[in-house]
Amino acid sequence: MSGCLSLVSYAVLVNGNAKGWVKASRGLRQGDPLSPFLFTLVANVLSRMLLRAEEKNLLEGFRVGRNRTRLSHLQFADDTIFFSNTREEELQTLKSLLLVFGHISGLKVNLDKSNLYGINLDQNHLSRLAEMLDCKAASWPILYLGLPLGGNPKVSGFWHPVVERISRRLDGWQNAYLSFGGRITFIQSCLTHMPCYFLSLFKISAKIERLQRDFVWSGVGEGKRDHLVSWDVVCNPKAKGGLGFGKISLRNIALLRKWLWRYPREGSALWHQVILSIYESHSNGWDANTLVRWSHRCPWKAIAQVFQEYSMLTRFVGGNEDRIRFWEDLWWGDQPLGSQYPRLFRVVLDKNIPISSILGSSRPFSWNFNFRRNLSDPEIEDLETLMRSLDGFHLSTSVSDARFWPLSSSGIFSVKSFFLALSQFFGSPQVFPSKFVWKSQVPFKVRSFVWLVAHKKVNSNDMLQLRRPYKALSPDICVLCMKHGESVDHLFLHCSLTTGLWHRLFQLAKMNWVPPRSIFDMMFINFNGFGASKRGKVLWQVASIAIIWVVWRERNARIFEDEIRNSEHL
């Protein structure tokens, strides 16, 4: 570290040439990897000075919650928030501390970037205090570490930074005229992950998902178009017929639930102490209370709203503590024992009783059930069943009680595992030819089109009649054969022109063929027309998709360009 400080030289660029090298006596070069570590060491000195001033009652800071948890400052890199009451003496003390810190460290507070914010404070009083501190008086909300503090997530303006950022990214593709496949790729690579920072603390605005939805179907600057496939289906995994986006609202839930997992594991953290002081402890002894009325501005409201769903997926391992409840926690079986044996649970005196109080600390179990009346015959049968099922349970006295996450092999909560579980729960089960659509070696825009064909959502004449009956007034006749109505199955399978192309393909493969009922069924049939080898299967799949693509282009050419090609040319 000494070498990094003493071997630095600087020069002034004059007309592009370095002139007058100056040897540095202090500080690090810009971009030096040691710079953030050195700054952290120095910033820690400021934190200790503030804590010492608290101990000597020179600074009171801000007290929060029922436990009156004291909060005087928050630091992250070179961004610091100080909390104070409105007494001028305390603010003068804070100003003096900052001046002393500047003298001993060489760092100086940038007053041009410093603001004073008041909570329930008269604006004139706030301006007077700001003038005393030589900074500016400002209003809520404020932007700190990229997130707005003091704003209301239910107000559309709160999400303006995210919406603006996404809109800027979309505007960059204004003149690119991306195909449907290109827009899918763009969303998967960029838009899905852009708002994750906001989503980890606040419940998402519907406008964010609407931006994605509109871009998929309409692009940018192309006017409003039909949303051909339901957004719930689009967000499904590819194996279930979707595009694999994942609903951003479900991703939001998974990111918020991460805090419920961290809360009991980070008991010494300041944020844990603040939440505990405001909302107190849950009756299970692990979590914060979820039965408190919150302000709309409080992130913990969104975090706690689906606590019930989260708790149903967490399991407990009994140890040598009394933190796991016998009846209400999930530690044996697929449900809490109170849900497995509701008749017994209704007559229990203490519903929060821990495991050790009923079973004891060792075998044989003591079975200290405490019911408020004598049990009926059905209840006795339930009790006997319960006792028999617990014969295989072993209470470990060498480890502490623990909570683990069964959806992860490590037992530790992950946003991905919870998100996948939510997607499977809310997603509609659907049989879909995903291998035919997505495993084919054709351009992505062609695969995207075949995906629409598999869902029967392309703009064939029969679909246009349904979507725009007041515009699509012409008969829905097929322009390829001019004999039958145009539907997806007819166009890509049963039309005389298309059937001829399929017959030619099967003749090349030396196979007899009877058309299936639908193009959807056709995608599921495994034809080994060019052999059972991997190369043969790939060739057959590409040839089949090529027929679908060529037929669609010929159909459009006849309608929009008045060009007709025969089957030989196709």
Image (cartoon, grey):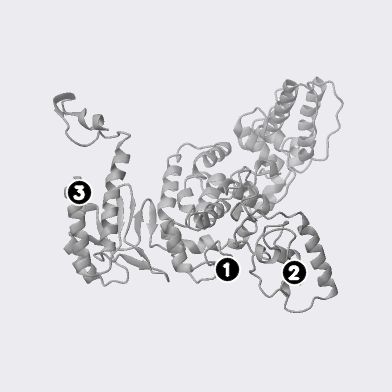
**Label 1: which secondary element:** loop
The image quarter containing residue 7 is: top left
- 492 to the left or right of 196: right
- 19 to the left or right of 90: left
- Provide the residue designation for mark 3: 108
Of the numbered discs 3 and 1, the one sitting upstream in the chain is: 3
The kind of residue on which mark 3 rests is: Lys
Of the numbered discs 1 and 2, the one sitting upstream in the chain is: 1
User: Which is more toward the observer, 523 or 333?
Assistant: 333
- Provide the residue designation for mark 1: 283
Seen at 54% across and 57% down, the residue is 260
Q: Position of residue 417 (x, y in %)?
A: 61, 47
The disc label shown at residue 415, or none: none
The kind of residue on which mark 1 rests is: Ser
Query: Alpha carbon of mark 2 to alpha carbon of mark 3: how far?
Result: 65 Å
Query: Alpha carbon of mark 3 to alpha carbon of mark 1: how far?
Result: 48 Å
User: Which is more toward the observer, 482 or 428?
Assistant: 428
- Provide the residue designation for mark 2: 342
Of the numbered discs 2 and 3, the one sitting upstream in the chain is: 3
The kind of residue on which mark 2 rests is: Pro
The image quarter containing residue 382 is: bottom right
Seen at 29% across and 54% down, the residue is 48
The image quarter containing residue 451 is: top right
Q: Position of residue 42 (x, y in %)?
A: 27, 45
User: Where does the C terminus fall, quadrant-wise?
Assistant: top right
**Label 2: which secondary element:** helix
Seen at 21% across and 53% down, the residue is 112
- 364 to the left or right of 417: right
Name, please, the residue furthest toward the left.
Answer: 20
Q: Position of residue 167 (x, y in %)?
A: 44, 47
| Mark 3 in CB contact with mark 1 (< 8 angstroms) | no
